[in-house]
């Protein structure tokens, strides 16, 4: 009789260990299925800027020298795998020597939107009355630096805007 009890205990113990092994194996598979994408997301390379990031802004032939024009354009921004399209603006100035400069639309003091006053021939920030010259330099006011500039290039008569840079 003792041998049949031992036999039942060894079968029961073997079955229990089998189920434990199956459960532990299933947990390992589920854990790996969750961990691998998370590790790939955290350690994977970020998307780099490319030539496709240049945005067509305006036809330079339509610009009048020394007369700034505010142009609107749409720019796509990639954040991880999410792509967001934003409406942006820039102040574009065709200089006397036919070079073109594009300024970011915010004052460098507190980020207020400035505007061009034709009669004064200055950019004016209404928040704290900072004045900027046509070349983006601070004339007066609390702004600590000149206007930020977009990187620009010409393709034929089309002005292409790149990233915005601090001056």
Image (cartoon, rainbow, N blue to C red):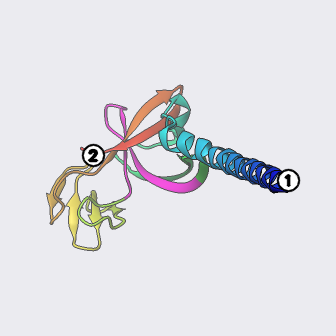
Task: Check the image and report above or below for 15 versus 156.
Answer: below
Task: Measure how far apart labels 2 and 1 are at the Cα level.
Answer: 86 Å
Judging by the rendered image, the residue that carries numbered circle 1 is 4
Residue 116 lies in what quarter of the image?
A: bottom left
Looking at the picture, tell me which residue is in the foreground, 95 or 152: 152
Q: Nearer the viewer, mark 2 or mark 1?
A: 1
Q: Is residue 155 visible?
A: yes
Looking at the picture, tell me which residue is in the foreground, 38 or 163: 38
User: Quick one: quadrant of the C terminus?
Assistant: top left
| Residue drawn where x is 43% and y is 43% of the image | 64
Q: Is residue 61 visible?
A: no
Q: Which residues are magenta?
A: 85-105
> How many residues crowd mark 2 within 10 Å: few (<14), some (14–19), many (20+)?
few
Looking at the picture, tell me which residue is in the foreground, 31 or 167: 31
97 left or right of 153 in image: left
92 left or right of 141 in image: right
Q: Is residue 71 magenta?
A: no
The answer to whether marks 2 and 1 mark residues whose Cβ atoms lie closer than 8 Å is no
User: Quick one: quadrant of the N terminus?
Assistant: bottom right
Residue 41 placed where, x, y %? 55, 43
Task: Check the image and report above or below for 114 versus 147.
Answer: below
Residue 111 placed where, x, y %? 32, 64
Secondary structure, mark 1, is helix
Residue 59 lies in what quarter of the image?
A: top right
Judging by the rendered image, the residue that carries numbered circle 2 is 166
């Amino acid at each position: 009789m003792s041998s049949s009890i031992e036999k039942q205990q060894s079968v029961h113990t073997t079955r229990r260990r089998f189920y434990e092994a199956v459960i532990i194996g299933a947990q390992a598979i589920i854990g790996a299925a969750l961990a691998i994408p998370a590790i790939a997301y955290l350690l994977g390379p970020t998307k780099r800027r490319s030539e496709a990031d240049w945005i067509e802004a305006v036809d330079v032939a339509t610009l009048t020298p020394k007369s700034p024009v505010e142009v609107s354009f749409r720019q796509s921004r990639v954040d991880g795998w999410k792509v967001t399209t934003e409406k942006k603006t820039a102040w574009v100035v065709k200089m006397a020597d036919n070079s073109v400069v594009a300024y970011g639309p915010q004052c460098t003091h507190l980020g207020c939107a400035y505007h061009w006053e034709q009669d004064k021939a200055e950019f004016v920030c209404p928040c704290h009355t900072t004045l900027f010259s046509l070349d983006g330099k601070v004339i007066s006011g609390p702004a600590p630096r000149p206007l930020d500039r977009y990187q620009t290039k010409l393709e034929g008569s089309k002005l292409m805007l790149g990233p915005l840079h601090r001056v």
